[in-house]
Image (cartoon, rainbow, N blue to C red):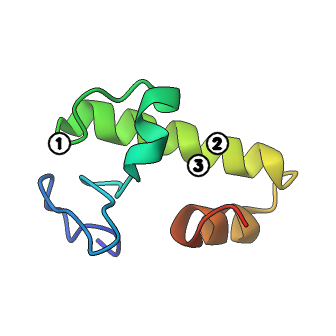
Amino acid sequence: KTESNFNPTVVSKAGAKGLMQIMPSNFKNLGVTNPFDIYQNVDGGTKLLKEYIDKYNGDIQMALMAYNGGPT
């Protein structure tokens, strides 16, 4: 709800696309060829979130902050 308001075709002011609001720079690494395809977008978004969970040693709060605001 927070990221896309459940709209699979939304594009944010920053350029993030789809349900999970993935930035275009992440598409290739996540295997997303169509960010508006619900299945690809959710799969890519969950992969990205898992990467952040691993990067921050299981710290969910840090992973969510990185997902929403960028890894730095």
**Mark 2 nearby-residue class (10 Å; few <14, some 14–19, many ≥20):** some
Which is more toward the observer, 16 or 41? 16
* Residue displayed at 46% across by 45% down: 25
Q: Is residue 16 above or below residue 39?
A: below
Say which quarter of the image contains residue 38. Answer: top left
Label 1 sits on a secondary structure element that is: loop
Tag nearer the camera, 3 or 1: 1
Q: CA distance from mark 2 to mark 3?
A: 4 Å
Question: Which residue is identified by label 3?
Answer: 49
- Residue 63 in picture, x, y percent from top left: 69, 61
Badge 2 element: helix
Q: Secondary structure at mark 3?
A: helix
**Kind of residue at disc 3:** Leu
Which residue does the image show at 41% across and 36% down from the upper left? Answer: 27
Image marks 2 and 3: residues in contact by CB distance under 8 Å: yes
Q: Earlier in the sequence, mark 3 or mark 1?
A: 1
Q: Could you say where residue 43 lies in the image, as x and y percent from the top left? A: 40, 33
Identify residue type, mark 2. Lys
Residue 72 in picture, x, y percent from top left: 73, 67
Q: Which residue is mark 1?
A: 36
The answer for how far apart the CA atoms under marks 2 and 1 are is 21 Å
